Image: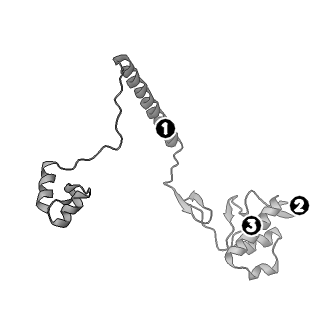
Amino acid sequence: MTPAQQLMVQDGLPAVLLLTSEQRAEAWRLNPPRAMPLFQAIPRNEDAATSAFRAQVEAERRQKSLNQIAKMKNRFAQKAVDHSKMRWDPRAAKFVPDHIPVLAAEPQISPTVHGGKAVGRTAGLILATGATTPVTKNNARALAEAAGVWKPEYEKLTGGLLCMTVKNRLRGLRK
């Protein structure tokens, strides 16, 4: 050791900290590092009957947990929906049938009439076939005119605002 290192050891520095690289390698070879357990298990002073009871309670708790998981899996399996013939409609934010009938260029509109105004279960065109088609920017004017709620200022609205306005007016009629 150097005189400075000897002085540090005299002042209380552990000499182990001043090992050379060869000495350190030899110490690691003789005493390799080991993982330290996170929690120390405290040994219990219990008799055989107590440890058997503890094991039985632990087994019952585990079985109860497994039964709850099995029930949950069964519940999810029963509620499973077949989406094979469905597609996601981002406008409606829900799954819709994959096959939607295509309308002709000029559909024949025959809205249900109540008090001289068109009403229905949904805000949309009720076709002669009985099917309801959603309000789009292409058919919003025809639907609003058939229902008697069209205003000339709606022509200035963009597609989304036009659809929303016509839907709101139709919902108001329905109420």
Q: Earlier in the sequence, mark 3 or mark 1?
A: 1
Disc 3 + disc 1, Cβ < 8 Å: no
Determine the secondary structure under disc 3.
helix
Q: Nearer the viewer, mark 1 or mark 2?
A: 1
Residue nearest the viewer, comparing 25 with 84: 25
Q: Is residue 10 above or below residue 163?
A: above
- Residue 68 pos. (x, y %): 49, 34
Is residue 74 left or right of 126 when viewed as pictured? left
What type is the residue that disc 1 sits on?
Answer: Asn
Is residue 153 left or right of 75 when viewed as pictured? right
Residue nearest the viewer, comparing 84 with 41: 41
Residue at the image point whose x is 31% and y is 43% from the top: 37
- Residue 16 pos. (x, y %): 20, 55
Q: For mark 1, what is the residue?
A: 74
Any part of residue 138 in sight: no
Q: Give the Cα distance between marks 3 and 1.
A: 40 Å
Q: Is residue 30 above or below residue 159?
A: above
Determine the secondary structure under disc 2.
loop
Determine the secondary structure under disc 1.
helix
What type is the residue that disc 2 sits on?
Answer: Gly
Q: Earlier in the sequence, mark 1 or mark 2?
A: 1
Q: For mark 3, what is the residue?
A: 167
Q: For mark 2, what is the residue?
A: 115
Q: Is residue 149 above or below residue 31?
A: below
Q: Give the Cα distance between marks 1 and 2.
A: 50 Å
Q: Earlier in the sequence, mark 2 or mark 3?
A: 2
Decide: few, some or many residues near mark 3? Use Cα within 10 Å; few <14, some 14-19, many ≥20: many
- Residue 88 pos. (x, y %): 54, 61
